[in-house]
Amino acid sequence: MNARHVLVLPDRDAAEEVAEELAGRFGVAEQPQLVRDALAGEDDAEAAQWLVVVEDPAGRLDSATLDAFAAEFEGWLEAP
């Protein structure tokens, strides 16, 4: 079961910190992908969320735990 988890964070700093901590806290071996997601209808460059995309080929990461982890950084786990 190859799963992909998308954590939504409020800014780049939070996204980078989450990406760094994923390896230590959850044993994520593959480097997560960081993606800037401009909010719909926003012209302001500051109005963007950052996504941390985590590949989970073994399907071992728990969604509730990832959601709680993202909440520590004022983010959340995007529902599939």
Image: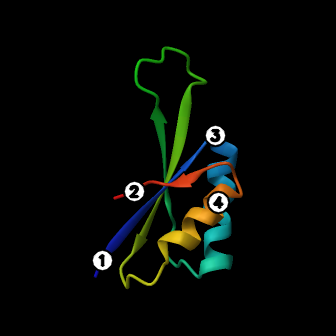
From the viewer's side, name the closer residue of 70 and 33: 70
Which residue carries the number 3 mark? Answer: 11
Which residue carries the number 2 mark? Answer: 79
Q: Earlier in the sequence, mark 1 or mark 3?
A: 1
Q: Quadrant of residue 40?
A: top left
Which residue carries the number 4 mark? Answer: 18
Name, please, the residue furthest toward the front: 64
Q: Is residue 11 left or right of residue 54?
A: right
Callout 1 crowding tier (Cα within 10 Å): few <14, some 14–19, many ≥20: few
Q: Is residue 54 left or right of residue 66?
A: left
Q: How is the image coloured?
A: rainbow
Callout 3 crowding tier (Cα within 10 Å): few <14, some 14–19, many ≥20: some
Instruction: Say what secondary structure mark 2 lies in.
Output: loop
Cα distance in 3D space between marks 1 and 3? 27 Å
- Which quarter of the figure is the N terminus placed in? bottom left
Which residue carries the number 1 mark? Answer: 2
Q: Residue at x 52, y 79 (%)?
A: 29
Q: Residue at x 53, y 70 (%)?
A: 64
